[in-house]
Image (tube, rainbow, N blue to C red):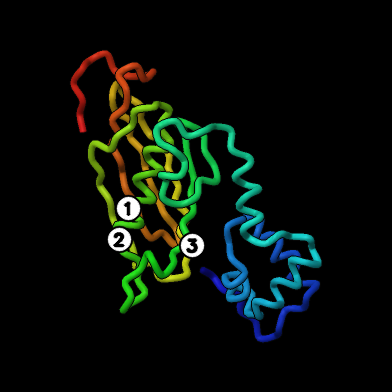
């Protein structure tokens, strides 16, 4: 995350428009991250938000979630790892996962990799416009460690729909830094539209 650097402290009048711009750019950003970015205290950020009538991050997340146009078909929402905040079936989806003490190794505070994979895998299932969606295979890469207290924003994009298979690209970020990526090949029902006429499936 880039940090505002200046020899002179930014005034409230200078900071607040930039703060609003930063939140508009990333509704999921926390007060802690904003405080680090603007090199002020968390309390200053909270006061700025109150003055500008900008809700806290949880309320912003709820607002974004209400803008969803579609409903998950392939699995119950409570089985998705993370909170889905945007979804257009067979196109894209976004979820967030706040890393807590139950996600990390107790000695290091580093998130266990299977939680990042589970968030990505369940979002790849959720984005499929079919009641039957299963992971056939996945090619994944962990870019850097994720630590306790960080928020992972996971984005799924459907890249190709074929008979019985859908290819979903996943990228996960902490702030603007990529921490995980993967390509998931998903089984789907034979009736999926846009499929090839051949029964042969290439991975």
CA separation, marks 2 and 1? Answer: 6 Å
Q: Which residue is mark 3?
A: 151
The secondary element bearing badge 2 is classed as helix
Q: Position of residue 84 (x, y in %)?
A: 50, 45
Residue under pointer 2: 113
Q: Is residue 127 above or below residue 64?
A: above
Q: Which residue is depicted at the point 41% across and 54% down? A: 172
Name the residue located 57 percent from the left edge and 74 percent from the top edge: 3
Q: Which residue appears farthest toward the bottom when viewing the image? A: 7
Identified at 41% across, 70% down, the residue is: 101
Q: Residues within 10 Å of mark 3 (few under 14, many from 20)?
A: many
- Residue 183, image x and y in percent? 31, 43
Residue picked out by circle 1: 117
Task: First in sequence, mark 1 or 3: give its number.
Answer: 1
Q: Decide if residue 159 is on the left or right side of residue 185.
A: right
Q: CA distance from mark 2 to mark 3?
A: 14 Å
């Amino acid at each position: 995350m880039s940090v505002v650097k200046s020899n002179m402290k930014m005034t409230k009048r200078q900071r607040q428009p930039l703060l609003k711009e930063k939140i508009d750019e990333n509704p999921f950003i926390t007060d802690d991250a904003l405080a680090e970015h603007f090199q002020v205290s968390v309390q200053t950020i909270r006061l700025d938000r109150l003055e500008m009538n900008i809700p806290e991050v949880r309320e912003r997340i709820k607002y974004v979630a209400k803008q969803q146009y579609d409903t998950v078909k392939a699995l119950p929402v409570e089985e998705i790892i993370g909170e889905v905040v945007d979804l257009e079936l067979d196109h894209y989806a976004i979820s967030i996962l706040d890393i807590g003490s139950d996600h990390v190794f107790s000695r290091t505070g580093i998130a266990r990799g299977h939680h990042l994979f589970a968030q990505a895998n369940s979002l790849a299932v959720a984005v499929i416009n079919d009641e039957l969606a299963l992971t056939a295979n996945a090619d994944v890469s962990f870019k850097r460690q994720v630590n306790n207290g960080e928020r992972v924003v996971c984005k799924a994009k459907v890249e190709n729909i074929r008979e019985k298979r859908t290819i979903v690209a996943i990228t996960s970020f902490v702030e603007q830094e990529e921490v995980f990526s993967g390509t998931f090949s998903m089984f789907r029902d034979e009736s999926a539209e846009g499929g090839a006429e051949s029964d042969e499936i290439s991975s």
